[in-house]
Amino acid sequence: MSFDLALEQTCTHRITEELRYPQGGDVVVPQMPLASDVRVRLNGLLDVPSQGVSIPARVLSVTGPFVSKGVTLLIGIQSIPIPRGSYSADQLLRVLSSVPNATVFFQAKDGRIIIETKEIGPYAKFYLPASSGAMLLGLKPRVYHGSTVAPGWSLVGVPGKLDDRPLRQILFDSPLPAETNFIELDYATTLTECLRCGGVGIEDDFSFSGGKVVTLRDEDLLLQEIRKIILTIRGSNVFHTRYGSKLGTLIGQKNIPSLVKSQITADIQQTLQMWLRLKTAQEAAGQLVTDGEMPVRIVDLQVQDSSPNTIGVDITLESRASTKVSVSRVFSV
């Protein structure tokens, strides 16, 4: 069965991993107009939402088992007794969690005890005084603080620019040192300034779905093959110089409009007839060609100069499965 990569798709106008450096430490200016769906990544590792990224005060113990001779762990002014015995991290977690604490909570991971504040950010903290319990866990007595890993940000207009385009920049709540930080931006830009589709709204590139490349078969394949042979300039493929049409050279020439229209009609008819012969030869060579992808006749061909600057082409073909597929294109002159 024949198949091909699905090439034509609606353009998302999305820009990904655009590398930028902060200007003045707190301003990031996108390369293209910023329309919507902004994502900010710091140093290639950390996704930064608009509220920023903050972490709690946190400390890890040494790796267990923990052998207690009857000790007490102090968290601020609160005492947590640890009876005599040998404890794994999970067993010790149950002992520490048995005493409610409004400031911190405990976790066990990879044989260690983690003490972490319930709040996050630079104002989150807890005091661990010197105690026999702290010695058991291998923790230094001190005040442990949370922090802000990445400041929040907002979208602001570009000063001194007209409001005819969505020219916006990213302003961080606090400066980022430009020497040590870089920003990667993902965002959607506008149709008129999209470099992916050139402003036409359609991009010709393969895509993936569920980790697999998207392919076309049957009538969908037939439809794409019509587009490809019509839009390919004849002679541009050095391995198949007869493949394609002369549409690119005919449109835009200085001549009588009715003559150009008849030349385009004749060229498309010749191109499609050649393509019908190619498909027949493909099947004759032993390749499986389904009824849905096999064209049998040209049902309709219309070429219309709807305005002095545009030419519309409408093609309808019938497949061997008796289904009709249509292609419509408007070309600028």
Image: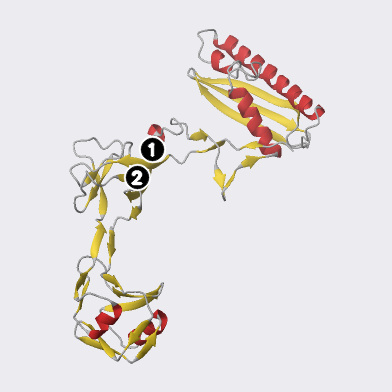
For the residues labelled 1 and 2, say whether their Cβ atoms are less than 8 Å apart.
Answer: no
- 1 vs 2, front mark: 2
Q: Is the residue marked by circle 1 packed among few (<14), some (14-19), or many (20+) residues within 10 Å?
A: some
Instruction: Classify 57 as above or below 196.
Output: below
Q: Furthest residue to the top?
A: 255
Instruction: Classify 98 as above or below 197.
Output: below
Q: Position of residue 17 (x, y in %)?
A: 38, 43
Secondary structure state at the residue bearing disc 1: loop
Among the two numbered marks 1 and 2 on one chain, the one whose residue lies closer to the N terminus: 2
Three-letter amino acid code at the position of disc 1: Thr
Q: Is residue 168 left or right of residue 251?
A: left
Q: Position of residue 149 (x, y in %)?
A: 26, 58
The one nearer the camera, 276 or 254, is 276
Q: Does residue 102 appear in the picture of this structure? A: no
Q: Is residue 224 left or right of residue 287?
A: left
Q: Circle 1 sits on which residue?
A: 190
The structure residue drawn at horizontal position 50% and vertical position 34%, both measured from the top left corner, is: 203
Specify the quadrant that holds the N terminus.
top right
Instruction: Classify 68 as above or below 244.
Output: below
Q: Position of residue 57 (x, y in %)?
A: 25, 70
Q: Circle 2 sits on which residue?
A: 185
Secondary structure state at the residue bearing disc 2: strand
In which quarter of the view is residue 106 placed?
bottom left
Instruction: Classify 65 as above or below 227.
Output: below
The one nearer the camera, 3 or 84, is 84
Q: Is the residue marked by circle 2 packed among few (<14), some (14-19), or many (20+) residues within 10 Å?
A: many
Three-letter amino acid code at the position of disc 2: Leu
The one nearer the camera, 221 or 104, is 104
Measure the C-alpha gap from mark 1 to mark 2: 15 Å
In which quarter of the view is residue 259 placed?
top right
